[in-house]
Amino acid sequence: MNQGWFVGVSAVVILLSGCGKEESKWNSFPLEIYADKTIAEDPEKSADFEAAMAFWEAKAGRKLFEYKGVWTGGSPFAGAAGSVEAIAANVMFYMSPWPFSETVAGQTTSFQKNGAVQSAVIMINPEMHFCSGDCTGFWETTSQRNTYAHELGHFIGMTHVNDNSNIMYPTVLRSNDLTTIRVDSSALQALIEK
Ligand SMILES: [Zn+2]
């Protein structure tokens, strides 16, 4: 399909659609990651982000992320959101205007070279009606914490599954309890082993 490098894209959707088919693996962990001001300066979004990182690290049994704080370097990538030419740094950010379908809550795009992921960005839909934390009393909205966790799954290289109790199910899970949400442990270990 290409000569040595490609950009992999995957998305989490409210309505189901196809995405997340590319295998992708980093050379080493933990991965440096930044967050934009929208996330880093908002206590609820920051808490959801920290909880989503902790979710994966608990499942992996090791440190996966090195949170570097707020990203101040402008757009973290060159090119259009759907076809980036390069990614300057690993950043999770609210992408405005949102260039994808309004039903897509988030999208992770990675830049790969020589069979390994070099960098990746997580784009979150600023128009989505998100609820933070355990979403108590906000059952008609989409779990921001689960969305972050799903996209962080793509970020580390996980792909979609058909199990609707697994965080990598293509639709954002409605469970308010991250501790009861499953992952494919063998797929996770295969990604992080050296
Ligand atoms: Zn997805």
Image: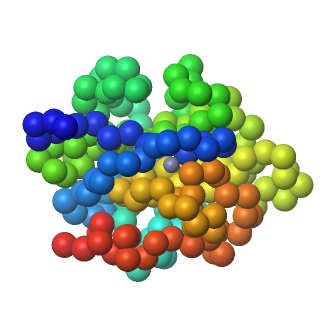
Work out whether residue 21 or residue 128 is closer to the camera in this orientation and state it.
21
Give residue 160's position: percent from left, percent from top. 48, 56
Answer with the quarter of the image where residue 177 lies.
bottom right
Given the current orientation, which residue lies at the most extreme right position? 137
- Residue 35, relative to residue 78: is it above or below? below
Work out whether residue 166 or residue 67 is closer to the camera in this orientation and state it.
166
User: Residue visible at 25% across and 30% down?
Assistant: 86
Work out whether residue 165 or residue 130 is closer to the camera in this orientation and state it.
165
Give residue 164's position: percent from left, percent from top. 63, 64
Q: In this rendering, would 114 be left or right of 13? A: left
Q: In this rendering, would 14 be left or right of 87? A: right
Q: Locate the C terminus by quadrant.
A: bottom left
User: Residue visible at 55% across and 45% down?
Assistant: 12
Give residue 75's position: percent from left, percent from top. 38, 25
Give residue 193's position: percent from left, percent from top. 25, 74
Given the current orientation, which residue lies at the most extreme bottom position? 61
